[in-house]
Image (cartoon, rainbow, N blue to C red):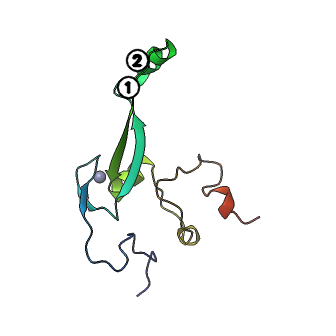
Amino acid sequence: MPKKRKNRGRKLGGSGHERIVQCYQCGRAVPADKAVKVTKWVSPVGGSLGKDLERQGAYISKRLETRYYCISCAVYLGIVRPRSEEERKIAVPLNRPYRKRGSSKLPLKFLKV
Ligand SMILES: [Zn+2]
């Protein structure tokens, strides 16, 4: 049977079971190797208030937050995108940001010149 993806959309490999994580957006239980992991610095004071305070010289401590998303939420939020058959064969880390629409979808080193 033809496979859509070489790794079946997971990083499981030969191991039988992977721990379960919850999707940050919808709460769905997802295997950790299938979920999209996003780690970023989050400020407790968000939005324009935080920016205003920092502009005035205030120091706001930030914390590193790791979030897991299920595939449908990651696609909805634009973290990952469906790729064409050829593009799917190129291994790109899942949480690497894609370029904006209009420019090429892939990082420069994968482009054929
Ligand atoms: Zn979700």
How many neighbours does mark 1 have within 10 angstroms: few (below 14), some (14-19), or many (20 or more)?
few
Q: Quadrant of residue 42?
A: top left
| Residue 46 in picture, x, y percent from top left | 38, 25
Quadrant where the C terminus lies?
bottom right
Q: Are marks 1 and 2 in contact (CB under 8 Å)?
A: yes
| Residue 30 in picture, x, y percent from top left | 26, 60
- Kindly identify the amino acid type of the residue bearing the numbered disc 2: Leu
The residue located at (45%, 75%) in the rendering is 5
SS category of the residue bearing label 1: loop
Dot 2 beta carbon under 8 Å from ligand 1: no
SS category of the residue bearing label 2: helix
Between residues 56 and 91, which one lies in front from this camera angle? 56
Residue topped by disc 1: 46
- Kindly identify the amino acid type of the residue bearing the numbered disc 1: Gly
- On the picture, is 70 further left or further right than 77? left
| Rendered position, 30 above or below 47 | below
| Rendered position, 22 above or below 85 | above
The residue located at (43%, 80%) in the rendering is 3
How many neighbours does mark 2 have within 10 angstroms: few (below 14), some (14-19), or many (20 or more)?
few
| Residue 61 in picture, x, y percent from top left | 39, 27
Q: Residue furthest right?
A: 113
| Residue 28 in picture, x, y percent from top left | 23, 55
Report how far apart the C-alphas of labels 1 and 2 lie in the structure. 7 Å
The residue located at (57%, 69%) in the rendering is 90
Quadrant where the N terminus lies?
bottom left
Q: Which mark identifies residue 49?
A: 2
